[in-house]
Image (cartoon, grey):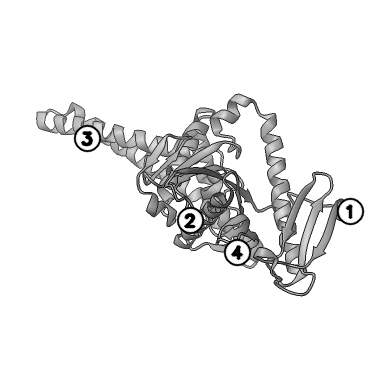
Amino acid sequence: MTMFENLNQIEQKFNRLENELSQPEIVNDLSLYQKTLRQHAELSKIVHAYRQLKKLKAEREETRELLGDSDREIREMAEAEMARYDSLIEAAEKELETLLQPKDPNDEKNVFLEIRAGTGGEEAALFAADLFRMYCRYAERLKWRVEVVSSHPTGSGGFKEIIAMIEGDQVYGRLKYESGVHRVQRVPTTESQGRIHTSAVTVAVLPEAEDVEVEINPEEIKVDVFRSSGPGGQSVNTTDSAVRITHLPTGLVVTCQDEKSQHKNKAKALKVLKARLLDMKVREQQDKISENRRNQVGSGDRSERIRTYNFPQGRMTDHRINLTMYRLDSIMEGDIQEIIDALTTHYQTEALKTL
């Protein structure tokens, strides 16, 4: 099937969905109406681009007829217009190719953002806090909701680990390329000699798992409850509200203590566990794909060093796409959309090569 045969079918489906949205039996069924509306919205960009392409091609054919006109000025004008239409049509076809490439089913999902201090001790913990703040600032720009699920703060204001749920539009689609090792180069506040230290922080972005995707057998988990504690062992409350869940088949452990309610902590911990199990499931599926294809579309392997933040030079470098920017201050304030756009374009281009 050619691209245009496929586009004709998509346009027909779009028209059918548009008609269904006015049918009483669908309008009165909220679940069905929302499903139909979502499908309609997903196809609208493709159909709009396809109709624009057809319009450009029709106008080019009308212009082609003028190439045989007896008036030389009209012929020259037509030749210039033909060149313009060729350029516009080429751009429209590329846009459609991008829109038609397979979508990641997780792109629309909310995520669990996990940030952990790696090598570098307290300096790594402080940078983990800086990165969390960066993502929170970015979330504010997009009106996303950020809720801390679990955190292990240090006495100096850093985090050994912090896990947060981020809810909003296209959260995973925007943040999925942030998974990996983030390296920082700067002079710690405790460094009296002014020497630059290198530390590392690990970021993981996990799509929220739906119940239909991951089932947890109650017999396969061990639930422990204990008292929540803050930095330095300071008691947060006097009840056993903190929850630790161990998934026995995989050995995964999730702890949640940020809520005062044991039930809320358990519910949050189960959500994080499901997200991690879904992540394992996806990775197992990726491992079955050839190494060559995984390299082309990007595995997102979080063991890779993906980015360096060099504070003395005010520089950020993303090593995957050789992108360097000298505006680190604004980046740390959440101005990262340009980086995310560049990564998305890169991986979409790589994916198109495999279609």
Q: Do the residues under discs 1 and 2 have CB atoms within 8 angstroms?
A: no
Question: Which residue in the protein does label 4 denote?
Answer: 147
Identify the disc placed on residue 79.
none
Q: CA distance from mark 1 to mark 2?
A: 39 Å
Among numbered discs 1 and 2, the one appearing first in the sequence: 2
From the viewer's side, name the closer residue of 324 and 124: 124
Q: Do the residues under discs 3 and 4 have CB atoms within 8 angstroms?
A: no
Q: Residues within 10 Å of mark 1 (few under 14, many from 20)?
A: few
With respect to residue 252, does 145 lie above or below? below
Expressed as whole percent of the image width and height from the top left, the position of residue 53 reads: 38, 40
Expressed as whole percent of the image width and height from the top left, the position of residue 189 reads: 46, 54
Tag count: 4
Among numbered discs 1 and 3, the one appearing first in the sequence: 3
Question: In the image, what residue occupies the spot 62% across and 56% down?
Answer: 162
What is the three-letter code of the residue carrying label 1? Glu
Q: CA distance from mark 4 to mark 2?
A: 15 Å
| 38 lies left or right of 321 | right
Question: Which residue in the protein does label 2 denote?
Answer: 134
Q: Residues within 10 Å of mark 2 (few under 14, many from 20)?
A: some
Expressed as whole percent of the image width and height from the top left, the position of residue 159 reads: 59, 56
